[in-house]
Structure formats: structure tokens, C-alpha cells
Amino acid sequence: MDTTATPLDLANPIATLPPSFRWGVATSAYQIEGAVDEGGRTRSIWDTFCEVPDAVDKGDTGEVACDHYHRMPQDVALIRDLGVDLYRFSVAWPRVQPRGRGPVNPEGIGFYDRLTDELLANGVEPWVTLYHWDLPQELEDAGGWPERDTAYRFADYSMMVFDALQDRIKTWTTLNEPWCSAMLGYAYGAHAPGRRDFAASMRAVHHLLLGHGLATQRMREASDGRHEFGITLNMGVSTPQTDSAADRDAARRSDALGTRIYLDPLVHGRYPADLVDDLARRGVTLPVQDGDLEVISTPLDVLGVNYYFSETVSGVDEDGNNTDPDGLPVTRVIPTGRPITAMGWEIVPEGFTQLLVRLHNDYGLPIFVTENGSAFDDVPDETGFVDDEDRVAYFDSHIGAVALARQQGADIRGYFAWSLMDNFEWAYGYDKRFGIVRVDYDTQERTPKRSAHWYRDTIRSLRA
């Protein structure tokens, strides 16, 4: 790793990033591909969830999305023109293995085979995410991630993709944001499959991690040694509003359920003792079987970090109660008056630096920022161009935060902007735009925004 001497360069931290630093853009399959009924693809939990009344804003679906399935070469040319090194994409499980069982679908894997070749022909290195939330519906019908069998099905599917593409792809990440899969999908009901069962969500956490470990073990055993394996987690920093015991405990609980529940078993081979105690008080036990933690803690080569915001939390409600009507401890997010994105998320770049340094100190893994970006209410001009100064400022401050974390010793090797282009933003449908390239959903025309030009020019300047 290249290092920069202390003291910290606060005036222009981005300029301290070395030529070896890697740059990329990222997407996910269901958010951009469309073609949900083509090439042998079967239904995912998101196809089903989109049909639930009021589940997705305006009843939007991923049926067409950005039509990337048909426009892939055009989109790869956009990626090439940004001057990035890497493109992080996800593979749609129900496209490669319809119904989540049985043999590989030649048409499905063929799409990703062509995508890989197109990227390499354009000088862009492909980076794979094997699971970005599109579980085959048949596996959810059999119980989904709360059921142990899903972990084994995931390992089988992962090997299908690895066998097909490992000759051309170096870096393999298993899961994207298992917190979202488990909590938004099974505890809060805000994402597919839309269940509201906290105990089921905790079972899902364990089986997601087990699936990661099983897949990583099998891929590593089949590897010739030139591959890297990892996982991507979404994390932030929870800061207590005051130094009171209630507020500090709220921050502890947030950290346990948001960060340590994943990284402690992945790196240290154990679940946090305080988390296990918290769960026991709720009558919940993680379904750990003999040998599971050894599988989950299969060594990682890279940790993907997705960062969007940090939070200030309190352990009491507006009336001063420290338990809610169900008798559970209160964890309340406190607005601090900072600027927010269109998602309502406070913009906290210094939290990014704090998180990255903490991850380095506590877990010691090489880090790639696999997602970072912002949604704003873009206003295109008559040509479709978006002068998104707010997004440029977000990238500038957050890439600077990455550089500051590196100056403090964190081993951060690359950065992926989220997202390459506007897309289906899950339960928000097409209302929220994260892209550095604008998509006109009526015409499917792509128009690079000011942020795309800024990103390209920043990368060029660091290589000059």
C-alpha cells in the first residue's frame, strides 16, 4: 500500500491518493437489467414484491429498468469513457439458475459471459457481486434466507458462476449488504420479500453469512490462487447524542446490529457477546450449528464497504422513556441539522473517515469502497444534461474522507461510485436518482451528468 506522510493533508486530501488507487463504478442486476421474462430467467422476490400494492412507489417495477440487458455494449462504452479501472456488477441468480435449483441456464450465464468479454475488450476489469438481493422466488417459497438450506443453494449457484467466469474475473464478492437483505427484507418489511419477523431476520443473518462462507470455501478450493474473495457490507457510525448511559447503550446496540454482527463472525469467528445477550432478552437465538463459525470466518482477501451516512442516536424517546410500548430499548435517530440528500440521509463525510479507520484498526482487512454516492432531485436542461453540483460536492467530500482515512493508516485500495446511472431504486421505484449518468426512462437515452465529467477529470488528474 502506498502511504502519505503525516501530518494530515486537510487542504486537498484527494490529491494524496496514489496512482495505484483503483477507480470504478457500480450497478446491480435487478436495478438496471430489465428483461425479467427473457433468456430463461424466472421470478425473483423483487418481481413478486413489486406486485404488492403500495410496496413500491408509484407501482414501479424492474421489468424494463434501464434495459441494460439489451443495451449492454452501449453501457460498457459509457464506463470506458469515464476512464475507470473497474466495473462492479451483480449477477441475477434467477437468470443463471432458474428457480434456484438445477443446472446452469446457458442463456443466462451467456449474458454475463458477453458482459465480461465486452468489459475486458474496453480495458475495464470486471468485479462480480454474486448476490444483490434477487433471491429466486421458489427459494423464498421454501422459507428464504431464514432457512438453512438457502445457504447451500447459494453456494451451488455461486460455483456455477465461478466455473463460467473465473478464467477472466479476479475479484469475487459474495453478498451485497446482508443487513438490507435480513433487516429490510425480513424484519421491517420495507424490501422484498416484505416480511416483518425479527426472529426470522436474525436467522437470515446467520444463513446469509453461512452462505457466504460456504461459497467462499468452494470457490477458493477451485481457484488457481490468482483470485480474491470478499463480501460487501453497508455501515456507518452511530454517535450517542449525549454521554448518558441510555444514549451510549443505544449507540452500542446500533453498532452491534449494524456492524459487529457481521464482521465479528467473518473475521474473529464469533458473534459479539453483547449482541447475543441483547437477542436473548428478546427471546431470539442465532441458529449456529457446530462448525458454522469456522466456515463463516473463511479468510477474506477484501472487505467491500458501502457508505452513505452516519447517525446520531438517543436511547430515550421524545417523552423521556427508554423503552418502547413493546418493552424494547429505544434507539431513536436524532436529526442534527446537517444538509440531507433526497433520501433524507444526513451528509456526514467525517463519519466515513471515522468508519474506515475503525474498520482498519479492529478488523485489519484490505478495503475497497464498493458503493458511495447520493440521490438528489436532478433537474435536466433541454438537452437532458444535469448540472448536479450537489452530487459533485458529495463525491468531493467523501472521496476526500477516504483519502484522509488512508493518511491515518487505513488500507483502502479503491473506490466505486454509486451509481453508474439512474436506475430502479428498490422501494422508491424510479423516484430517486443516484446516477452520474442520467437515464430518460421514456427513451432510455443516457446523458452523463456534471458529476460524471467531474469523476472522469478527477481520475485523470491523479494519473497525470
Image: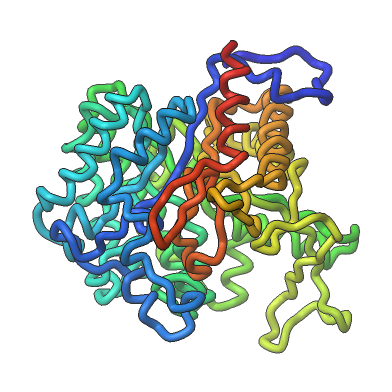
Name the image quarter holding the C terminus.
top right
Q: Looking at the picture, how far across and down is residue 439, in whole percent?
A: 46, 53
Q: Nearer the viewer, residue 457 or 365?
A: 457
Q: Looking at the picture, how far across and down is residue 64, in whole percent?
A: 33, 63
The colour scheme used to paint the residues is rainbow
Residue 19: name its quadrant: top right
Q: Which residue occupies 56% across, 62% down?
A: 432
Q: Is residue 32 above or below residue 282?
A: above
Q: Which residue occupies 30% across, 49% down?
A: 91
Q: Is residue 369 above or below residue 59?
A: above
Name the image quarter holding the N terminus.
top right
Count of marks placed on residues:
0
Q: Which residue occupies 26% across, 38% down?
A: 115
Q: Nearer the viewer, residue 122 or 56?
A: 122
Q: Is residue 312 left or right of residue 53?
A: right
Q: Looking at the picture, how far across and down is residue 246, in whole percent?
A: 83, 67
Q: Is residue 187 above or below residue 28?
A: below
In the rendered image, is residue 291 in sight? no
Residue lying farthest to the front in this orientation: 382
Q: Is residue 436 left or right of residue 117?
A: right
Q: Looking at the picture, how far across and down is residue 448, in whole percent?
A: 52, 41
